[in-house]
Amino acid sequence: MIAVVAVFCSVKGCSWRSVSSNMQAIEAYLPTLETAIANDAAFANVKVFPTTAHGGTIEIEGQLSRRNFDRLRAIVDSTSPPRPVKWFVEVEDDTRGE
């Protein structure tokens, strides 16, 4: 059996070389972000991983309150991600009728 895997680049200037370089940058960056959120129980169910989508992106998924989502965004921004971040986070309303 032969498996064929294809990564389609729809971004101008996207090539295998640029995707590879971008993925290396993401892999080098991820420990910084993981360390920044590791000791906070609010982020225990947050998953962070690299993808080849759009030439290499960082994907973040999970469920958070609005307050914790805002905190996470601030942490991510402060760590200067080398590539775009795609958010797949369900944000729960924590205003409780306010």
Image (cartoon, grey):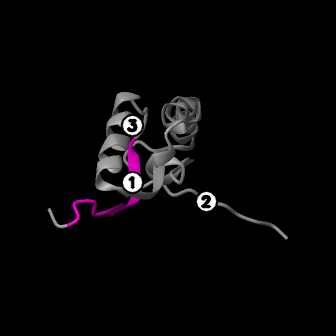
Name the N-terminal-most of marks 2 and 3: 2
Gap in Å between the C-alphas at discs 2 and 1?
24 Å
Name the N-terminal-most of marks 2 and 1: 2
What range of the chain is rendered magenta?
Answer: 84-96
Q: Note whether 33 is above or below 49 in the view shown.
A: above
Magenta stretch, main secondary structure class: strand
Which circle marks residue 76 in the picture? 3
Residue type indicated by callout 1: Trp
Residue 52 is situated, as x and y percent measured from the top left of the image, at: 53, 50
Residue at 33%, 41% (x, y): give it: 71
69 displayed left or right of 22:
left
One can see residue 58 in this view: no
Residue 17 is situated, as x and y percent measured from the top left of the image, at: 56, 37
Magenta stretch containing residue 21, yes or no? no
Name the N-terminal-most of marks 3 and 1: 3
Which circle marks residue 87 in the picture? 1
